[in-house]
Amino acid sequence: MTTYPLQFFQVPTGPMSNWDYFWYQIPFGAPGIITFLVGVFLSYFAFQKFRNSSGDERIFNFNLAVSFVSFGSIGLVLTLRAWIQDIDSLIFWNDVLYFLVAPLAPSGLYLAYAMTGKRTKLLLYWSYLLWIASLVLYFGILIGKGFEREIFEFPFGKYPKGSAFIRPWGILAPIGYLFLILPAFIRYYSIMRANYHPALIHGVNLLFLLIVSNAPSILGYKVYPGGFFLFIPMLMVAYGVFRSDFLDVNELLFQKNGMFYFLFALLSFVLIFISFGVSFGLSPLSYEASKWYPWGIPPVLSVFTAVFLSIIVAGANPSARLNQLCAFALILTGFYVMQSVPLKLNVSYVVQLRVSQITFVAFSFAPSIMVRLVFEAVSQKEPKWIRIIDAFCFIGAMLSPSPYLFVGYFVYPWSRVHHGGPAEALIGVTGILGFALVLWTFFRNRGFINFASKWIIGSFMLSSAMLLLALLPSHGIPLVPISDFQFIPAFILGYAVLKHGALSLEGRTIQLSQKLANLGLLTMGIAGILYFPLIRDHYGMGESAFHLLMIVLPLILFNYLVIYIMSRPLAEELDISYFLLDLEKQKADEEREKALIAQDKAEEAQEESEKLLLNILPFKVAQELKEKGSVTPARYEKVTVLFTDFKGFTKVAEGMEEQELLQELDACFTQFDEIILRNNLEKLKTIGDSYMCAGGLPVPNFTNAIDSCLAALEIQSFMNQLKEIKISLGLPFWELRLGIHTGPVVAGVVGRFKFAYDIWGDTVNTASRMESSGQTGMINISRETFEDVKYFFETEYRGKIYGKNKGELDMFFLHRLKLKYSVDQDGKAPNQLFRDIYAKLHGGAKVRWKSVERTD
């Protein structure tokens, strides 16, 4: 067997190009990017809590949001100090970003002041002082005297010296922590512990401690700034403040589709980075004496197959835990294979090394995700020992950007291969442990696993085995990198998903997304065809095709990803519609009947509710009550009140059974209700055998006296007919007195739990006297009503008659409609002439009369 010597990576000395400097410094700046992204993410949630809070809590959440932005900006500042070599660019970006960094000190002091129960006023005053220092800092930056050109150079970056405008802020902030925040937290810890989660208390402390740890580097000491790792205490603070939102991680990641959007935000960034990196980072020399053909084709195919399937699987059901874990595992697998592509090209080893380190940060979590996927597929709860795997994965991810991941490389005929160091060994051991647990879980539960889930588990077991075999060439054993062929288990998984519906994939959703993406695919294809002749002049035919493939494929997948996410809501609606249609086809009659019954019941319930309210209150009053919750009392200058009362009711009732009596009374009052409804009157109440209604309210009109008289004639006619029927049957009968009066009233709703619409005023009393002073079977009206109806009805003046507590009152009997306004000799029903005049009066027209004749 041919042996291949181990070669070691040498850091070059002397000047470097900005591009090479960036790649060498990536491990130092990467944690700052994480801090920045975490800061932006958490500031969004803090701002949402600020919008939904009030008072002191609102001020607290505002300062929390500001502090998250500032701490995240510090991470970005430190990253740029690690990655930017040009001094002028570095100073410019430090000046710009310190506008966002400056508020962290005063907002942090206020958070500490609020958390200690506002017992230490000095914290508040110190925050005011820091706001003044921040304003001084802003002024210095605006006049071009922020950071000086004097630079402290460290292995982890270049640090410009702050001017006299920045130093007060930089001195006051650490003093505030060391001499105010820390003692206050120690003194009031028990009080804080009773009101705040420990994660919040320790997170705030650690935030300031890491900020203070930046001081040595600013003063010129080669101490790695703790600010790079601010994302750790920031997450602690977020957990402490938002524990009600973040405690249920399952809800955040799956029910709220958080994992879905996180995965595809990550994918979008990676795809764009790949496309631009290939476009601007690969020269024709990269393909000379390289292994791109044929060894570069399998990993490229594996990467894009894994990414494409992850989009399909996760988008099929964003809220399903199984789908998201499966998509996550595919992406992590794709990340691993991604680092294999640069190793096949003739590029600087530092680029190959950094790409591998970045991808291993994510890939380190593959064992944890895959084990969880298997337990989800077999519908079993995750065991507690899975936390051990999580811990190993986290340690591996933290060590991936360090020199402990790889300690050199081998040059094989197919490509370079990194020689694994302690970090890679830890990741490998974790992978072996995870693979063994997956295998054990699978064989233990194989009798309970459905066919589709077996395909899923089988594909990941194959993938894991291929990845573990990749450890052999990384330790000098010249085995062809089988792990580059990850598209094979990916295709198996795709078969399980598409053929057997393992992940509840809705085909119509995919079809819709693909159709919407066709335009983008066509555009990308045309762009690639147009671009091909340009690169054909610099590359060979095969190199041009491979180069174009690595540029265009990420853009195509990015385009597909964006359209897939944007079309997802519409696709879900269509899927629901198709599902309901299929369901109706299978159970057409039964489901249709259930739907109709449910709809009828809902409509009936709504109608009954509306009827019940309208039975109690007039429509206008009911609407006002529903809209405002109360009804404003109103005065009406002209309302006609009608009273009825049965003569001899008590005597007749004594000879009837209770049920018969109620039925008889209900039959009469029901008929009265229908009559007054036809005549534009409102029923007010019944009191025993008395019935009261009124016209001209709640909507005023000019015809309420006429309406009341027409209704009285109908009621009189009904009672006469009922009397004749009772006499013919030899049954006792009731006779009715009716009284009508017109005048002003006050109307409103009384009661809080049982509403009643009622009226008050002298008009009500007078109407009651009209009824009690009348005669059986007759309609007795007042002088005021008579004046409004005398041109339409035949009346008989009774003279002045005493009314109880009212004195002498003019009273009239209302007999019938005048002959000229009646359709028959009975004078009960109006003719068309009456209706024409009535319509004009109802609309507000004034009618002038000569004697008893009318003129328009």
Image (spheres, rainbow, N blue to C red):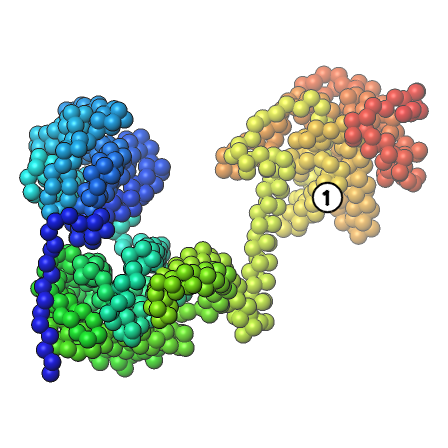
The residue positioned farthest toward the left in the image shown: 221
User: How many callouts does the rendering have?
Assistant: 1
Is 87 rendered above or below residue 455?
A: above
Q: Horizontal and vertical percent for residue 226?
A: 13, 44
Give above or below for 251 relative to 378.
above
Q: Estimate the x, y position of residue 104 in percent, counting from the top left.
A: 21, 34
List the single residue furthest toward the top.
807
Residue 173 visible to the viewer: no
Q: Nearer the viewer, residue 659 or 136?
A: 136
Q: Give the SS element for disc 1.
A: helix
Kind of residue at badge 1: Glu
Q: Name which residue lies at 29% across and 48% down.
A: 245
Where is residue 431? Give x, y as percent: 17, 70
- Name the residue beneath numbered marker 1: 674
| Residue 195 seen by the camera | yes
For residue 335, what is the image quadrant? bottom left
Mark 1 is surrounded, within 10 Å at the Cα level, by few (under 14), some (14 to 19) or many (20 or more) other residues, namely few
Q: Name the residue at 76% across, 27% down.
A: 702
Q: Is residue 18 left or right of residue 680?
A: left
Residue found at x 38% / y 63%: 537
Q: Position of residue 548 (x, y in %)?
A: 37, 64
Q: Quadrant of residue 785?
A: top right
- In the image shown, does 763 or 212 lie closer to the viewer? 212
Quadrant where the N terminus sits is: bottom left
| Quadrant of residue 105 within the rendered picture | top left
Q: Is residue 490 left or right of residue 149?
A: right
Which is nearer the eye, 592 or 346?
346
Quadrant placement of the C terminus:
top right
Identify the residue shown where x is 83% and y is 23%: 846
Along the line of sight, which residue is nearer the eye, 427 or 371?
427
